Image (cartoon, rainbow, N blue to C red):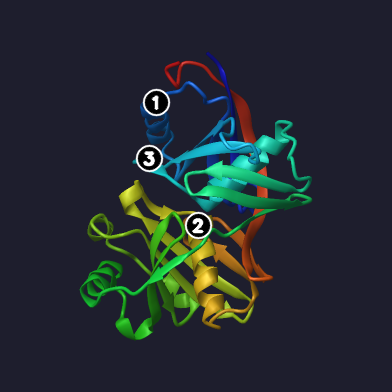
Amino acid sequence: MSHPFKLVDVFTSGPQTGNPLAVVFGAEGVETARMQAFAHWMNLSETAFLLPPTRPEADYRVRIFTPKGEMPFAGHPTLGTCHAWLEAGGKPKGGDTILQECGVGLVRLRRDGDTLAFAAPPLRNEAVGEDLLQEVLAALYLDPSRVEAVRFLNNGAPWLSLLLQDAADVLALEPNAAALASLPEIGVIGPHGPGSFEVRAFAVPSGILEDPVTGSLNASLAQWLIGEGRAPARYTAIQATRLGRSGRVSVAQEGGETWIGGTVRTDVEGALTSLLGS
C-alpha cells in the first residue's frame, strides 16, 4: 500500500533553515510499531502520521514520534502537519481556525497567509530540585552565576528550562552528550535584547542531541517568561544558530492565550511504498 508523504521545513526563514518534519498521510491501519520503526529510520526530531479524527469537532488527528518514542504533543509537528494537511486539500471546519486532535487533546491553530500558529496547551510549571540542577549545570559545563531562573515545564512535552543572562551564554554552550542521556530534555534561553531571545534544545533522551527549532519548548518558555514579566508579550525566538540554520519562532500573548507561530514550506513530496511494511 502506498502512502502520500511530505517533508516540510517548519519555523523556516528561507530554504532549509528550519526544522524538517516527515508527514505520512493515510496512516490508519499502520501498526504503532511500524510508525516507530519508520520514525527511527528517518532520524528526524519528529515524524508525524495523519489519521482521521475520532472527535467530531476535530479536522484531523496526528500521532507524533521521535526516533525513540511517541509524544502526546510537539510544536513543530503541529505546525508542519497542519501545513501538509492544508496543502493536500484539507478543508477546516472553522474557516481559518484548524482543530488538531493529538495525544494532549484538541489544539487550535490559525493561519495567516504563509504563517501558521498554535495556541499553547496548558502548562505545568514546577520547581527543580537542587541535586538535579547541579547535574544539569555540570552536563552543560555552565557557570551557575550565568543562570537567572530554572523551572521544569510541561505542556505535553516536558522540558527542564533555564533562563541565562544573555544570548551569548546560550550560544557558548558545549554540552556533554553522554551526561545529558540520563537527564530530562533541557531547554535554554537568553535575551539578545528587548524583542528577541536565543533558544537551544537538548533532547538526548529522544535520540537527538540538539533539536533544531522546538515549538513545544518555545510555547512553555513563553508562558513562563511572559507570565513572570521576564519577556514582553510579543517577541521572536531564534533557534538553530549553532546548527548552521536560522529558525524563527514568533511568540504572541493575546487575551490570555500564548500563540506560537512560524513559516512552513514543503521541500519534498511523493509516496512511500514498502517503508511502512503495509
Q: Are marks 2 and 1 in contact (CB under 8 Å)?
A: no
Q: How many tags in the picture?
A: 3
SS of the residue under disc 1 = helix
Along the line of sight, the residue nearer the viewer: 245 or 149: 149
Crowdedness near tag 2: few (<14), some (14–19) or many (≥20) residues, C-alpha within 10 Å? many
Residue bearing the label numbered 3: 67
Measured as percent of width and height from the top left, residue 179 is found at 23, 60
SS of the residue under disc 3 = loop
Please identify the residue farthest to the left as the structure is shown: 131
Quadrant including the C terminus: top left
Amino acid type assigned to the residue bearing label 1 in the image: Arg
Amino acid type assigned to the residue bearing label 3 in the image: Pro
What's the mark number on residue 216? 2
Q: Is residue 123 visible?
A: yes
Q: Are marks 3 and 2 in contact (CB under 8 Å)?
A: no
Residue at image position (74%, 31%) is: 89
In primary-sequence order, the first of circles 2 and 1 is 1
Along the line of sight, the residue nearer the viewer: 236 or 241: 236
Q: Which circle, 1 or 3, is nearer the viewer?
A: 1
Query: In this rendering, would 139 be left or right of 65?
Result: left
Query: In this rendering, would 132 be left or right of 32?
Result: left
Alpha carbon distance from label 2 to label 1: 25 Å
Measured as percent of width and height from the top left, residue 203 is found at 37, 54
Amino acid type assigned to the residue bearing label 2 in the image: Ser
Q: Work out whether 19 lies above or below 34.
A: below
Residue bearing the label numbered 1: 34
